[in-house]
Image: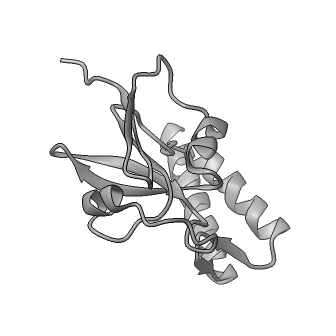
Amino acid sequence: MATEKKVILLKADGTRQDLTPEKKPTLEEMQAWVGGYIEVVRVSFEGKKVPMVVNEEGLIHRLPINYQAGRIAGSPIVGDVFILIGWRLLRRRMDYKQLRTALEDILKNYPETHIATIVIPREVLKKSLQAVNDCLEMRLKGRD
C-alpha cells in the first residue's frame, strides 16, 4: 500500500492547510513556506516519524510562537512550518568516493567548518578522510 504524499502547512496564526503536490517541493518552495532558511526537525505525527520543516533563524527573527507545531514537536516552535508526509527529505546516500571528495573539499577550502552549530575539528575531518580512503583501498583489493 503506497503512502499518501502530502504537505501540511501549520501557520503561526493557528491555521492549517493540507496540500497534495504532485512532486516533492523544491528548496525554494520550502523556504517560501517558512519565510527563510530551512531546518528539519524529526517529529511523531499520526504515529509516524516525519520531517517538520521550520525556519532555521526563526528565533533570531523573533517569529511568533507556533502553538500547534510546538504541541506536535514537544518543544517550542516559532513561525510557519510544514510537515512532509510520504516524502523523503534531505537524505542522500553517498558512496565512498563522493564522501572522500566532499571531505577533501572541506579540508581544502574551509579553515574551520561549521555544520549547523557543531564545529568539526580539522583533525576529525582528516581521520574521517583517512578512514574513507582505507575503505576504498579494501574494496579495490577485494575486486582483484
Q: Quadrant of residue 84?
A: top left
Q: Nearer the viewer, residue 26 or 104?
A: 26
Quarter the N terminus occupies: top left
Residue 3 pos. (x, y %): 25, 24
Indicate left or right for 119 with 10 as reference: right
Identify the residue at horizontal 44%, vertical 55% (top origin).
Answer: 12
Residue 45 pos. (x, y %): 23, 47
Identify the residue at horizontal 46%, vertical 41% (top origin).
Answer: 89
Q: Nearer the viewer, residue 76 or 1?
A: 76
Residue 66 pos. (x, y %): 40, 60
Quarter the C terminus occupies: top right
Number of marks drawn: 0
Identify the residue at horizontal 61%, vertical 36% (top origin).
Answer: 29
Residue 111 pos. (x, y %): 81, 78
Q: Nearer the viewer, residue 144 or 105?
A: 105
Q: Nearer the viewer, residue 59 or 141?
A: 59
Instruction: Determine whether 68 is above or below 139 in the image.
Output: below
Instruction: Determine whether 83 is above or below 4 in the image.
Output: below
Indicate left or right for 139 with 107 as reference: left
